[in-house]
Amino acid sequence: MHIMTVCLGNVCRSPAAEAVLVRALDEAGIEGVSVSSAGTADYHVGERPNPASGAEGERRGYAFTSRGAQFGADDFDRADLVLAMDSSNEEDLLALARTPEEAARVVRLGAFAPDAGEGDGVRDVPDPWGQSREAFVAMYDQVEEAVAGLVAALREGRLEEVVAAQRVRR
Ligand code: 4NP
């Protein structure tokens, strides 16, 4: 199984979500799941993660190995699950999907957070680009919480159920 994390620039949120997910899968002993990330825009292709995102991630012990890449429709050829950080990323990804089956693989990461479905429904992971260090700290806290939910859903065989529930709300 291949999972992709996707944001706008692929330098702040999606590399963070990729690193958090890689480590969480390893710690949970889940094998056979690979992870990569991409941005819907081409602004930062080939670049390392944004310094503020990398610094907060490294402070938390995460490793960053990938470079900025743009998501293209052919990424649906390999991705079984495409995790959008916010609603705008989700809309852009749905516009790239070539079939309803590909569109069905797109879900916001927040669908796996403990508060998903309550109050505001699924929360976006807000764009921290150009913001203070606190925004990056909050972004990692939010990503770690949702990734824990995703790993639990994988372990308990509830992945498709969570994805389908968000699809109905969309
Ligand atoms: P990301 O943040 O989507 O979390 O990587 C951004 C990075 C760059 C830009 C916007 C958001 N930008 O406009 O260059």
Image: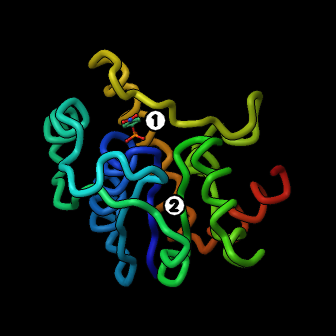
Q: Which residue is mark 1?
A: 142
Please report the residue visible at 52 percent of the width from the left and 84 percent of the height from the top: 77
Write the residue at 72% across / 70% down: 104
Q: Measure the alpha-carbon separation of dots 1 and 2.
A: 16 Å
Which mark is in front, 1 or 2? Answer: 1
Identified at 15% across, 45% down, the residue is 61
Q: Quadrant of ligand 1?
A: top left
Dots 1 and 2: beta carbons under 8 Å? Answer: no
Of mark 1 and mark 2, the one earlier in the sequence is 1
Disc 1 under 8 Å from ligand 1? The reply is no
Q: Amino acid at mark 1?
A: Gln
Residue 46 point in image, percent of width and height: 22, 57
Question: Amino acid under label 2?
Answer: Ala
Question: Where residue 138 sits: x, y (%)?
Answer: 39, 26
Mark 1, other Cα within 10 Å: few <14 / some 14–19 / many ≥20 = some
Left or right of 63? Residue 97 is: right
Q: Position of residue 128 (x, y in %)?
A: 40, 27
> In this figure, which residue is indicated by the disc labeled 2?
152
Coloured how?
rainbow
Quadrant in which residue 110 is drawn: top right
In the image, is 45 to the left or to the right of 75? left
Whether residue 164 sits left or right of residue 29 in the image: it is right
In this rendering, the answer to whether 74 lies above or below 164 is below
- Using the image as rendered, state which of residue 167 and residue 161 is in the foreground: 167
Residue positioned most to the right: 168
Report whether 62 appears left or right of 72: left
SS for dot 1: helix
Vertical side of 126 occupied by 134: above or below:
above
The quadrant holding residue 60 is top left
